[in-house]
Image: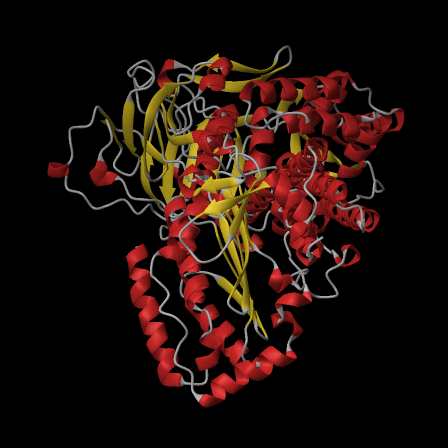
Amino acid sequence: MSIFDWLPWRARKKSPEELAEIRRVFAARYDHFRLLIQANTRAHELIGELEEALRGFTPYGMQYVNTLCTRISTSIFQMVRHLGELDAKGHDELVASMESINERIMAALAPESHEVGGELVVDLSSVGRDHADLCGPKMAMLGEAGQSLGLNIPAGFVITVAAYRRFIEAGGLRPEVARLIQATDSNDREALFRTSSDIMQLVMDTRLPDDLAEAILTAYNRLSDQLGERPDLAVRSSALGEDAEGSSYAGQYRSVLNVNRDSLLDAYKEVLASKFTRQAMAYRMNRGIRDEDVAMSVGCMTMVDAMCGGVAYSRNPVNVRDEAVSIHSVWGLPKPVVDGTAETDVFLVNRETLVVSERIIAEKPDMFVCSPETGVCRESMLEELRCEPSLTDEQAATVAREAVRIEMQFGIPQDIEWAMTRDGVFHLLQCRPLMQIESSSVPQVSAAELPKPVLSGGRVASPGVGVGPAYSVRKDVDALTFPDGGVMILKHALPSRAALLDRCSALISEQGGVAGHLANVAREFGVPALFGVKGVVGNFENGRILTVDADGHAVYDGAVEALLVEKPRERIMRGSPVQAALRKAARHIVRLNLTNPESPEFKPENCKTLHDIMRYCHEKGVSGMFEFGTDNEFIEAASRQLICDVPKQFWVLNLDDGFLPEGEHRADQCIMLEHVDSYPMHALWEGMQAVQWEGPPPVHTKGLMSVMFEATMNPDLNPSSGTRYTQKNYFMISKNYCSLQSRFGFHFCGVESLVSDRTSENYASFQFKGGAANVERRILRARFVGDLLEDLDFRVRVRQDNMFARVEGLPRKAMARRLKILGYLITHTRQLDMIMTNNAEVQRRKERFLEDFKMFD
């Protein structure tokens, strides 16, 4: 027997059965590795989605937050599971760390616990602004205005937030409501419609606890004794967060008018159920408000026998520089003003002199009045009053004076609802912060530059310009097919249509006023809106492109480019409770603490976030698969030697779809480059072969002595030492993935990259380590390479002679350019450590490298 028979590379040839078993083991391991990489890719994509959600440009609700965090956790758990199949070492510790992290995420997402205590019913006369947490801001502000300003407010009582929570808990509604909402895709309008109906019916079918029903009826009896008669009541919502500054909730909840004692309990439940109308649920999602944070209190107030009523703004809602008080008024109850179903009189009053500067009198054929038999009903106006102003100038001055007083009391502009009785007495029904917006930045375009409008006129309910396909919404079912970016066309500006505003580019309505609920929400969402445009319904077929210029009171056919400006993106979720919950959870997901795989701290028990778990699984998965792949037995069975014109051996491990059929079916253990179908490998290889290496740099005596000394002292440079530097050069590839582990000269290089058409998934990482010179020169070379890569958008970390770099999220072509440069650096940084103390030579090499990089542009 020859002595060569004992050498390691003369391993005994395997039998066909042994080779088949090795291939089977490889196939099983690779399947787990492939699934681990897929889960890693999904997790990176989902974390990217989370980071984008944190920026707050697009609306989302808690359902989305919970689902996203669950999907991230599930993807990373898949990584843990498949890593356990590749290497069971540390698996139990890794699972324990992940369970601990998930518990912290769930705690961050859990709704705050709320005390159920407190009075179930309180008298409205005793309520002030300090009672907002118990009675909601609407009733708290109304009570405060009555007490502090001596204003006439209706007598009544408030069914508190504590009562709402008592009802929800006693009826077992909380888990069922949460289940229904969680199971509904908020982007599926039909499903949202069903869920809304199901929850509202569930609330109506749930019996009030006996103590709560008794407290409500006792409060009614007490009010009856106080007034000396059994009054009819207005039952109004006053939810937590409603009418808070920046979130109006205008018209999203139900008010039930002219309610007697027999109907009071059902009316109360109607208002509670209105928390789950489609428009209210859509509004909460678009404002980032968690469903569980909205508890409903309800005000029960005597009806005011109104001669006229309406809404007053203490300042102009669409022009912050206009300080005039605007009053919107109708005969009878103010209901048609707030729900947008009628034309209104408009009075503009100077806030200093209280003189009416302008009046616009509408035709008012109908009025709403209280009816003992039917509650609230519509009556026809007398012919002689239809075009008469609903307010005298003196009465308009009275309304304006009170609006200014209320603004001064609360310190911010106010939106007030009021009524005036036949004796001329002003009654305050509601007050809330007024949301003001700047005039839109519409380009100044002369009429000569614009086409002729197809419609003109109307009133600016919300400023701006919008373009999109026309779509008439006549009934609820039309909302299911309303297109994204559509121009919504309405007969009446009903509050329920607010559910579609997040999909609108503009809004046109035949009726409705600036003071209506829909106009309020349109301004809040920044949707241009024109109201009072006669004949618009049925004038345009669905799908016809329209440009709506609300400021110019005009509608144009097609897209009028001269009027269009790109709107700045608004961070609509900023500061919202939903974003706050996601931000808390993200602390246990996104942060990366486990950064150095070679550190002794790189252990499962040191994983503090899901990103740490990802990093650990990926590093251990790649290294475990590669170490398995570099085993001599495995090489013989599973890898192919690359046929190439370079004086080095490269082996290629095909992980999945990295070979063309011509290469896959070769009888020998070789592969030709043209039969490799891996995009990142081809880019890397092109860079490695682009410019022929000019050989070692000229070395002065100190540099040569440094190399010789290091070669004798560093065991990693001894080819017989069996260290990682004696490994052969291996590519592990698939169609979009490549991992290269290689020794070039006296230094070690590692490249890993994923490049596909999905930009968010793309990345390339590069590790550069070692050398033949002393530590100082090796460190200088690592920094030299790192500096070059930082200029190419890589994130670079240098520790001693170890350089780590990573770039991600670039398009396919940009990633290929950077891989070519990495390949170039792998080839041309050989033995540069020997000249790193020669500044002139280093500068020359840098200039040469930068010039060569241009060939990859």
Quarter location, residue 275: top right
User: Is 63 situated above or below 705?
Assistant: above
Residue at 20% over, 27% down: 453
Left or right of 459? Residue 639 is: right
User: Is 843 situated above or below 156?
Assistant: below
Residue 323 image point, x, y percent: 39, 51
Residue at 58% over, 84% down: 709
User: Is 427 situated above or below 573?
Assistant: above
The residue at the far left in this view is: 448
Residue 309 image point, x, y percent: 50, 30
Quarter location, residue 366: top left
Location of the C terminus by quadrant is bottom left
User: Is 45 situated above or below 373?
Assistant: below
Q: So how many labels did they put on this image?
A: 0
The residue at the far front in this view is: 1
Residue 283 image point, x, y percent: 56, 34
Q: Nearer the viewer, residue 418 or 602?
A: 602
> How is the protein colored in the picture?
secondary structure
The residue at the far bottom in this view is: 701
The residue at the far top in this view is: 373
Quarter location, residue 170: top right
Can the viewer see residue 625? yes
Can the viewer see residue 332? no
Residue 33 image point, x, y percent: 65, 41
Left or right of 219? Residue 1 is: left
Left or right of 220? Residue 704 is: left
Q: Nearer the viewer, residue 391 or 522?
A: 522
